[in-house]
Structure formats: structure tokens, C-alpha cells
Image: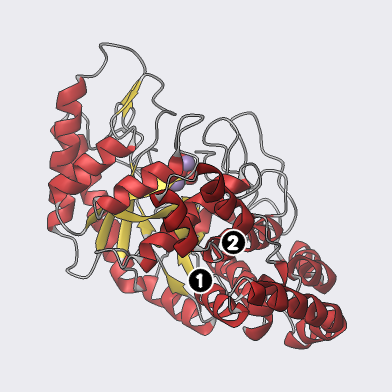
């Protein structure tokens, strides 16, 4: 972790400018009848899980350009996540991918996490790649496979992942399936869905009583013709067929261009089936770019639905917030610091929406004023609120600045030998 006195020194140096900005914003919000303190408290309570696969440099199928000082194992990944949490106060949990980050000794990993004041969010299973020594191949699918033995193996893997998760203290499993086909005729469209549901039912039957199971949809890649769980409709059908503890996970990059994702979120909320998010951003496909980097207004509109749901006290509303990004060019830690800030920004902006006024404009069909109400919140610079929330959590007023000044990455370059890091696929 970083030396806390470094963070304190940085905050002291930045304090005077920050104080003035914060006061100014507080007065501005007061005129809008918003208590800035309430917003800071809510931003402070926001937490998002970091995926274990986001700490090393990512890549595409064309290549990978690793930076130095990458974590070599899950223990070092946890160390990096602890630094992100130290600077932001907002990433207390890790979402583990198995087998990429399968711990040899889950109890020992849990102890390491405890020492770092970290916990575990959803565990992720992987039946989209073959592992060394594996009995059957997933080349033609896993839960959807025509061969019952492959399906059995995929179910067993998910049960194993849940066992690991139980030891770690997780309370949910995310299942993303690459299952699908590349050509018309290759796969029976209805039968493959039914086999998938059957496998998920076997997994769901073993789900610990206090756990949730998330199905994650994705339109294409690696299946280029038909993916079994290709859209939120398929995901919702599965979750509804499975039962109350099955919900849908929305990965922001898993939609075809121009999909209205906030509307998808609203529909899943209505169905009581919004399980959580994989935050990232994209221009074209499953690009896994920094959340809020390409379409910040969309991110705000998604959070607007979430804040609205909280205020409406919707049944079963308890979304798991997770990041799912691949950092090909940026330093992964810096990219994650930036991501956390972008998520908190969208959340804080959404908290500023004057919902009473919006409801009135909607009721009277005042289109312009309704839109302007959203824009007014979105266009408010909430930077001082984010900085204040971090400062109160003993984090940094400017996390990236402190991270760079502290020389953490350089220290890791010296300490962590290159060459041992095995990158996950670019999925
Ligand atoms: C997929 C999904 C899913 C999965 C990941 C692996 O987003 O969350 O765990 O890739 O990198 O595209
Ligand atoms: Mn995802
Ligand atoms: Mn993805």
C-alpha cells in the first residue's frame, strides 16, 4: 500500500483550492435546494468491485503490449486493488475469475484479503476456454453442448466455482456463456437454449441459500452467428425460469450499437431482475474501455434509472456493481482510478436530478423542460463532491496524481519480474 503520509501531504497541498471549490458548489446547490452534504454521504457509500482480470495489461487477438510491473498472481493483484481502494475508498471488493485466478488455497487468499481490508464480490466461471488436462472440449459450447458429458463437465465447473466462492465469502456467481454458433444450421436454436436452461437449473439447485446467480448476455463474439444468451430478453427468460435468486447482469459493452441501455435497465428493474453491472464503455462492440470515456451521458442516464429505483424503493433492488474492462494502453491501476471517478461522477450527477420537477414536466408533457431537468444535473461539475468523498475516506483529492507521485508502478517494475504474467484472453 502507499504511505498514508504521502496522501495526507498531497491533500494538504490541494486543500485550499478544494475547499473553495467545494464551498462554491455547496452554495450553488443550495440555491437548487440540494444539500451537498447528503450527496457527499451517498457518493461515499458507493462501492464497485474490481475484476481480478483487469490488473494486468489486456490485449486484443492481434497482440499485447505489456507495461512493466504487472501483478504475477492473484495475491499481487489484490495488492494493486488495495492501493486503488486506499486512494478512492470505493473498491472494497474483488470479483474473481476462475480458473484464471483460481487460488491454490482459498482460505489463505481470504486471509490475505482480510489483511488488506478487502472482500470478494461475485465469482466468475469460465467454460469458454479449454484448460490443460480438461476431459472434454468446449469448442462447440458448454451448457448448450449436444454431448451430455460436456454439459456435465460445465455444470461441475460452476459448482466448483461456487465452492471456492463460499470459502472466500462471495455471495454470487456470474455466468457468461460463449455458447453459440458461427453458421446457420450449425446449432438448433431452440434446443440449444433448452439445454442451457437445463444446465443452469442444475447449478441453481446447488446455489447457497443466501447467494444470487447472474446470467450475463452478450450479442456476439466468439459466436458470430447466434449466441445462446445473446440479449437481455434471453437473459430475463433464463432468470425467470430459474427462480427468485437468479437475476440478469448488464455489461454495458454487451449491446449492439445504439441500443438504449437505460431502457434495458428500466425493463429489468420492472421485472425485479436487475442483478448488477459490468461497467465499461464502448464505441463499437465489447470494447471494454474506461467507463464514461466514450458515452458519459449514457452512463449518467443509466445511473439516473438506478437513483430513481432507489427512491421508488423497488422490490428486489440490490444491484452488484462491478467493473469489466481491459486496459490495453493505459496503466491498469490508473485506468481503474479513472473508472471509479467516472462512475461516482455519473452517480453524483444522477443524485442531483430534481425528481419532483421532472415528474411534473413528465405529467404535463413539457418535453423541453423535462429534458432540461436531466441536462442541468448532468452538466453540473461535481468534481469537488467526489474529491470531498475521497478525502473523508482518507483517500486522495486527486488519486492519479498521488499514484504517479508515489512511484508505485516503478517500485513494482523493480520488484515483480517480467515474463511470469499469463494474460487472460481478450474476451
Ligand atoms: C466476457 C464477459 C464476461 C467475462 C469476460 C472475460 O464480459 O464478463 O467474464 O469476457 O474477460 O466478454
Ligand atoms: Mn462482462
Ligand atoms: Mn465482455
The circle drawn on residue 46 is 1
Q: Residue at x 73, y 86 (%)?
A: 4
Q: Is residue 409 visible?
A: yes
| Rendered location of residue 289, percent (x, y) | 61, 44
The answer to whether 9 appears left or right of 296 in the picture is right
The answer to whether 4 appears left or right of 389 in the picture is right
| Rendered location of residue 63, percent (x, y) | 66, 33
Q: Residue at x 42, y 64 (%)?
A: 103
Seen in the picture, residue 202 relative to 353 is either above or below; the reply is above
Q: Residue at x 59, y 61 (%)?
A: 349
Q: Is residue 97 visible?
A: no
Residue 39 occupies quadrant: bottom right
- Which of 62/285 is in front? 285
| Rendered location of residue 369, percent (x, y) | 55, 49
Secondary structure under the numbered disc 2 in the rendered image: helix
Residue 185 occupies quadrant: top left
Mark 1 sits near ligand 2, with its Cβ under 8 Å away? no
Marker count (numbered): 2
Residue sitting at the far front = 364
State which quarter of the image contains the N terminus.
bottom right
Seen in the picture, residue 86 relative to 185 is either above or below; the reply is below
The circle drawn on residue 349 is 2
CA–CA distance in space, label 1 to label 2: 13 Å
- Which of 247/313 is in front? 313
The answer to whether 399 appears left or right of 33 in the picture is right
Mark 1 neighbour density, 10 Å: few (under 14) some (14–19) many (20 or more): some
Seen in the picture, residue 405 relative to 100 is either above or below; the reply is below
| Rendered location of residue 61, percent (x, y) | 58, 30
Mark 2 neighbour density, 10 Å: few (under 14) some (14–19) many (20 or more): many
Q: Which color scheme did the rendering employ for the protein?
A: secondary structure
The circle drawn on residue 87 is none
Secondary structure under the numbered disc 1 in the rendered image: loop
Amino acid at each position: 500500500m502507499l504511505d498514508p503520509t504521502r496522501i495526507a501531504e498531497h491533500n494538504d497541498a490541494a486543500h485550499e483550492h478544494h475547499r473553495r471549490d467545494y464551498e462554491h458548489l455547496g452554495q450553488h446547490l443550495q440555491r437548487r435546494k440540494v444539500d451537498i452534504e447528503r450527496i457527499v454521504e451517498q457518493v461515499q457509500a458507493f462501492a464497485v468491485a474490481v475484476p481480478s482480470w483487469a490488473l494486468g495489461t489486456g490485449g486484443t487477438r492481434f497482440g499485447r503490449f505489456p507495461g512493466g510491473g504487472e501483478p504475477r498472481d492473484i495475491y499481487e493483484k489484490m495488492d494493486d486493488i488495495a492501493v486503488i481502494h486506499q486512494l478512492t475508498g470505493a473498491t472494497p471488493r474483488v470479483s474473481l475469475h476462475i480458473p484464471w485466478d483460481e487460488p491454490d488455497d482459498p482460505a489463505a487468499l481470504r486471509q490475505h484479503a482480510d489483511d488488506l481490508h478487502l472482500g470478494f464480490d461475485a465469482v466468475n466461471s469460465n467454460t469458454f476456454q479449454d484448460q490443460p488436462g480438461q476431459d472434454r472440449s468446449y469448442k462447440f459450447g458448454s451448457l448448450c453442448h449436444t454431448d451430455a458429458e460436456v454439459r456435465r463437465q460445465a455444470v461441475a465447473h460452476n459448482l466448483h466455482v461456487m465452492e471456492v466462492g463460499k470459502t472466500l465469502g462471495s455471495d454470487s456467481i456470474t455466468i457468461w456463456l460463449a455458447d453459440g454458433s458461427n453458421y446457420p444450421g450449425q446449432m438448433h436454436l431452440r434446443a440449444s437454449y433448452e439445454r442451457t436452461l437445463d444446465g443452469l437449473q442444475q447449478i441453481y439447485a446447488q446455489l447457497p441459500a443466501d447467494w444470487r446467480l447472474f446470467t450475463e448476455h452478450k450479442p456476439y463474439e466468439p459466436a458470430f452467428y447466434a449466441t445462446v444468451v445473446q440479449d437481455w430478453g434471453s437473459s430475463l427468460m433464463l432468470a425467470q425460469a430459474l427462480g427468485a435468486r437468479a437475476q440478469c447482469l448488464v455489461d454495458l459493452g454487451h449491446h449492439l450499437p445504439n441500443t438504449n441501455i437505460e431502457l434495458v435497465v428500466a425493463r429489468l428493474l420492472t421485472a425485479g431482475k436487475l442483478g448488477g453491472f459490468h461497467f465499461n464503455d464502448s464505441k463499437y462492440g465489447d470494447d471494454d474501455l474506461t467507463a464514461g470515456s466514450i458515452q458519459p451521458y449514457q452512463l449518467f442516464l443509466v445511473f439516473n434509472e438506478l437513483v430513481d429505483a432507489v427512491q421508488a424503493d423497488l422490490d428486489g433492488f440490490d444491484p452488484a456493481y462491478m467493473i469489466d474492462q481491459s486496459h490495453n494502453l493505459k496503466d491498469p491501476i490508473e485506468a481503474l482510478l479513472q473508472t471509479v471517478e467516472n462512475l461516482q461522477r455519473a452517480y453524483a450527477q444522477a443524485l442531483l436530478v430534481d425528481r419532483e420537477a421532472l415528474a411534473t414536466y413528465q405529467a404535463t408533457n413539457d418535453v423541453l423542460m423535462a429534458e432540461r431537468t436531466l441536462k442541468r444535473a448532468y452538466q453540473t461539475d461535481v468534481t469537488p463532491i467526489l474529491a470531498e468523498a475521497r478525502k473523508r475516506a482518507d483517500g486522495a483529492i486527486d488519486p492519479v496524481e498521488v499514484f504517479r507521485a508515489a512511484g508505485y508502478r516503478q517500485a513494482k517494475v523493480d520488484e515483480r519480474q517480467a515474463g511470469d504474467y499469463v494474460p487472460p484472453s481478450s474476451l
